[in-house]
Amino acid sequence: MPDHPIENLMKTAMENIKDMIDVNTIVGDPVETPDGSVIMPVSRVSCGFAAGGADYQINGDTHKGDESLPFGGGSGGGVSVRPVGFLVVGQNNVRLLPVDGNPVAERLIDIAPNLLERLQIIMQQKQQSETTPETPPETPVI
């Protein structure tokens, strides 16, 4: 049995969608900055596909034996690429800078580990200063 025309429609549409989308569409090409950091754009990719068709009769003729009926059909697809943010790698850390959302909340989440580390250092220094006895000031000899 020869291939049905709908198979060719679907194959053509899927190949075209495949050609439009690759890994560089999701994680873009890295760009190096003068300070040595590397910035990579990150995107969300969505795609959709539909195909349909039907064999139809001409002027009410009935289908007889192995004769193939005329075919009418179509296919279509679409791709949506939406930027999510930028991945910044450099200076011993990795950060995701979002394109949309609440920048204040994102910044607080981003600096929280550094803030906690600094608070721990301050608390350790305070405990050390409380446990070491202070030497009384020397009194001048007259």
Image (tube, rainbow, N blue to C red):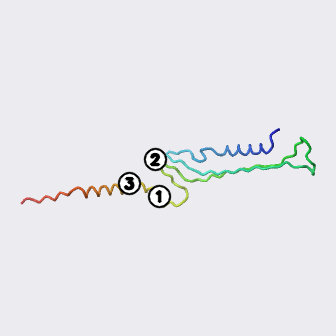
Q: Which quadrant of the figure has residue 111?
A: bottom left
Picture residue at 15% right of the left edge, 59% below the top: 137
Q: Which quadrant of the figure has residue 19?
A: top right
Farthest residue to the top: give it: 1
Residue 19, disc? none
141 vs 25, left or right, is left
- For marks 2 and 3, give the CA distance: 19 Å
* Sequence-first tag of 2 and 3: 2
- For marks 1 and 2, give the CA distance: 17 Å
Q: Which of marks 3 and 1 is in front?
A: 3
Q: Nearer the viewer, residue 125 or 37?
A: 125
Q: Residues within 10 Å of mark 1 (few under 14, many from 20)?
A: few
Query: Mark 2 = which residue?
Result: 90
Query: Mark 1 = which residue?
Result: 107
Residue at disc 2, secondary structure: strand
The number of numbered discs placed on residues in the rendered structure image is: 3
- For marks 3 and 1, give the CA distance: 16 Å
103 vs 52, left or right, is left
Q: Are marks 2 and 3 in contact (CB under 8 Å)?
A: no
User: Identity of the amino acid at label 3?
Assistant: Glu
User: Identity of the amino acid at label 1?
Assistant: Arg
User: Identity of the amino acid at label 2?
Assistant: Gly
Q: Which of marks 2 and 3 is in front?
A: 3
In the figure, 129 relative to 13: above or below?
A: below
Q: Residues within 10 Å of mark 2 (few under 14, many from 20)?
A: some
Q: How crowded is mark 3: few (under 14 residues within 10 Å), some or many (20 or more)?
A: few
Identify the image quadrant of the C terminus: bottom left
Percent coordinates x, y for residue 72 in the rendering: 83, 48
Residue at disc 1, secondary structure: helix
Picture residue at 73% right of the left edge, 50% below the top: 50
Query: Mark 3 = which residue?
Result: 117
